Image (spheres, rainbow, N blue to C red):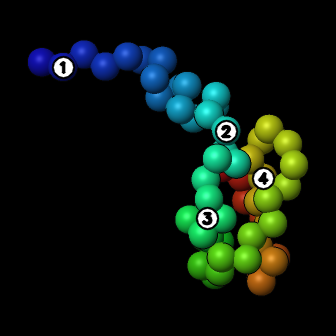
Amino acid sequence: MSVSDPYEEVYTKYMTDPLQESEDTLSCPHCLSELVDRRAGYRGEYKCKNCGYFWRR
């Protein structure tokens, strides 16, 4: 039986930098366009330049 660290999921979700992803791996979940504007800030906010869809990670 494997025991996982309960804080590992929290760390990867909230403490890792969402801007570490390369530009070509991030796409709009609405229209699948890769033209994404990364807004500054720690919340991981994104806006599609193609369809205007706004989302958070």
Q: Residues within 10 Å of mark 4 (few under 14, many from 20)?
A: some
What residue does disc 3 label?
26
What residue does disc 4 label?
45
Q: Secondary structure at mark 2?
A: loop
Q: Eyeballing the image, is 25 above or below 18?
A: below
Q: Residues within 10 Å of mark 3 (few under 14, many from 20)?
A: some
Q: Residues within 10 Å of mark 2 (few under 14, many from 20)?
A: few
- Residues at marks 3 and 4, CA–CA distance in whole angstroms: 12 Å
Query: Reading the chain from its start, which is encountered first: label 1 or label 2?
Result: 1
Q: Which mark is residue 2?
A: 1
Question: Which residue is outermost to the left?
Answer: 1
Query: Reading the chain from its start, which is encountered first: label 2 or label 3?
Result: 2
What residue does disc 2 label?
17
Q: Eyeballing the image, is 2 above or below 35?
A: above
- Residues at marks 2 and 3, CA–CA distance in whole angstroms: 14 Å
Query: Which amino acid does the dot numbered 1 rest on?
Result: Ser
Q: Residue at x 18, y 19 (%)?
A: 2
Q: Residue at x 64, y 28 (%)?
A: 15
Q: Residue at x 62, y 34 (%)?
A: 16
- Residues at marks 2 and 4, CA–CA distance in whole angstroms: 12 Å
Query: Reading the chain from its start, which is encountered first: label 3 or label 4?
Result: 3
Q: Is residue 34 visible?
A: yes
- Residues at marks 1 and 3, CA–CA distance in whole angstroms: 32 Å
Q: Secondary structure at mark 1?
A: loop
Q: Position of residue 41 (x, y in %)?
A: 85, 42
Please state which of the two labelled residues, at mark 1 or mark 2, is closer to the viewer.
Answer: 2
Q: Secondary structure at mark 4?
A: strand
Query: Which amino acid does the dot numbered 4 rest on?
Result: Glu
Query: Which amino acid does the dot numbered 3 rest on?
Result: Leu
Which quadrant of the structure image shows residue 52? bottom right
